[in-house]
Amino acid sequence: MVSWAATAEMVAQRWTAGDVPTAYAHNTLTKGAQEARRAAAKLGQAPAAPVAREAQARYAELAVRLARIDAVIADDDGRAAAGLAAGLPAIRLKLDRLQSGCQAR
């Protein structure tokens, strides 16, 4: 999921700069949101370990953020897209810390 957050951040930034077509941004953000929702749902079926619940929450947060960015891109609102994309590094950092913590175990 860390890579999806990074990809979405890059796509949103490049879209607001006019370097990425709207259709490409839409397809990328839609796929990323789907993958994040799928990962969150899968973790929802796992045992209630605290790290799994935290990851599930972060995946859901990413899915919502990507869907919101996709919606404002569809409305051709570069300012809103940039604002929403500005929150992706924090989500990516949380996901990275979770991933690093899981790998250390």
Image (spheres, grey):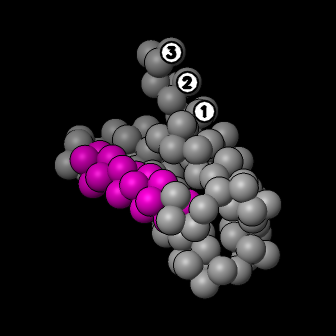
| Above-or-below relation of 27 to 91 | below
Cα separation, mark 2 vs mark 1, equals 5 Å
Asked if the stretch drawn in magenta spans residue 36, the answer is yes
Query: At 52% across and 58% down in the image, what residue appears?
Result: 24
The range drawn in magenta is: 25-43
Residue tagged 3: 104
Query: At 36% across and 50% down in the image, what residue appears?
Result: 35
Residue density around tag 3, few if under 14, some if 14–19, many if 20 or more, within 10 Å? few
Residue 19 bears which disc, if any?
Answer: none
Q: Main secondary structure of the magenta part?
A: helix
| Above-or-below relation of 74 to 69 | below
**Three-letter amino acid code of the residue under disc 2:** Ser
Q: Are marks 3 and 2 in contact (CB under 8 Å)?
A: yes
Residue tagged 2: 100
**Percent position of residue 33, x then y:** 43, 59
Is 69 left or right of 99, judged from the image as shown?
A: right
| Most foreground residue, 66 or 60 | 66
Residue density around tag 2, few if under 14, some if 14–19, many if 20 or more, within 10 Å? few
Residue tagged 1: 97
| Most foreground residue, 58 or 13 | 13
**Percent position of residue 91, x then y:** 62, 50
**Three-letter amino acid code of the residue under disc 3:** Ala
Cα separation, mark 3 vs mark 1, equals 11 Å
Q: Are marks 2 and 1 in contact (CB under 8 Å)?
A: yes
Query: At 79% across and 60% down in the image, what residue appears?
Result: 17
**Three-letter amino acid code of the residue under disc 1:** Arg
